[in-house]
Image: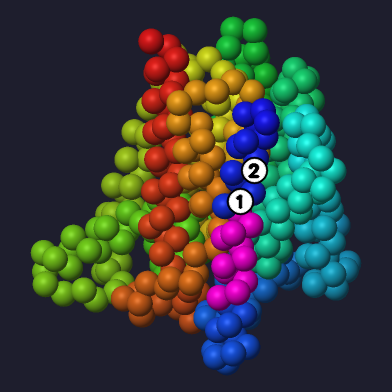
Amino acid sequence: MTFPQKKLYLALLILISGMAVAVFWFTWQGIVLNRNYPYNNFLFAPNSSLSDFTDFLRPHAPAGNYFPSAFLVFYPFRGLPPTCAALLFQGIFILGLLLILHANLLRLKLELKVLLLADLTFIASYPVLICVDRGNIEILIAFCIATFLWLCSKERFGYALAILLPAICFKFYPGILLLLFCQRNRIHWAIVGALAFFFINGGCAWLLPQHATGVSQQGLRLYTERYVLGDWGTSGTASAWNMFRLVVWLIRGCWEQTFTWPMPWSMVVVTLDVYYALAFAGFLLVLRHILYVEKNFFRKAILLLLYLTVSVPGGGDYKLLHIVIALVVMILLTGQRPGDLLIVCLLAFSLIPKQELILPFIDDISASCPDVSIGVILNPMCLLTAMWVIAWGGWQQQN
């Protein structure tokens, strides 16, 4: 058994076991104990199903945290029934992800039954299911990033940049992957990508000022107020923001001898400012490691994928799609370093549902999002630990 195959089997064991436990637990809670959401479902609140997509089909809908160019994606679907449009959108890009996944796993020379099991396990993993359930555009972002890395592996950097651009234009944070071009003979691709982002979004804002610019600004403001500062996004486990907010809340409670959730609004704002400062400091450390320490292109990519997932304060679980990509890239790496199996375990564990353990002390939260689970603590810890292990391995390799 080759080392990549060993990593794959380890990841499949964790993913399949974790999903089996979740399915059994929530089936028992729902059918046998006759309990309602969130005890009978590890996805999002049923009354919000597909709403991330269908909300945008309403005229001038002030929803989402997208740039003006995202409207180019939504407009072609406005003539369809909202549910059909959302499922069609998800289906297109899930199929694309499956094809990219299958093409890459073929390199491992697996038995057909193992290959098909791996395809099914990754494409039906929790982040994909939650993305479909929410109807979120992150599935397009994930497809673009996966295809970008696949094209980079073939050194087709121009095509890679072209496929990454939609991801950057719709949500800015995939732009961190342009750092992969920060080498003497590739830096021009990073410059072209940055310029293209401003040109495309500027053009969309100019051509569609009423439909794009105003709605985008309103949507970004509402997203920040509701999902970052407010309680609507507290269940998100992909980002370290919710974990950080819980730590501050706990420290404040110990200091003032009162544990009332949520914290005062003014304190949440200050906490977010501190979090941004810490996230920027983390970015500088990652940047230094990418530019001066790590030599392997795809280990750099894994580190950047982990950072963009864990650092952005909007931590909806659909963002764990990028961890699926990072895990697959980690499995495909042929070189072996100390800690590689630990990284596989940490990434795979972060991808399994954890709503079996709900945090009961957060009891004053919006009814649309009551399922604040232990995942808001465990997942960021897994991702940050994996980042540290990758960085440590790079330093060991350099020395």
Which quadrant of the figure has residue 261? Answer: bottom left
Q: Is residue 67 visible?
A: no
Residue at horizontal 27 percent and vertical 58 percent from the top: 247
Q: Which residue is mark 1?
A: 13
Quick one: label 2, few (<14), some, or many (20+) residues within 10 Å? some
- Residue at the extreme top of the image, as rendered: 184
Say which of 136 and 362 sits in front: 362
Residue depicted at x 82% and y 58%:
91
- Give residue 56's quadrant in the image: bottom right
Q: Which residue is mark 2?
A: 9
Tell me the magenta residue range: 15-25
**112 above or below 78?**
above
**Which residue extends farthest bottom?**
34
Asked whether residue 374 is in view, the answer is: yes
The location of residue 395, given as percent across then percent down, is: 39, 18
- Which quadrant is home to the C terminus? top left
Residue 17, percent across and down?
A: 59, 59
Q: Nearer the viewer, residue 151 or 105?
A: 105
Q: Which is nearer the eye, 203 or 377?
A: 377
**Three-letter amino acid code at the position of disc 1:** Leu
Viewer-closest of 206 and 51: 51
Residue situated furthest front in the rendering = 1
Residue 398 located left or right of residue 165: left
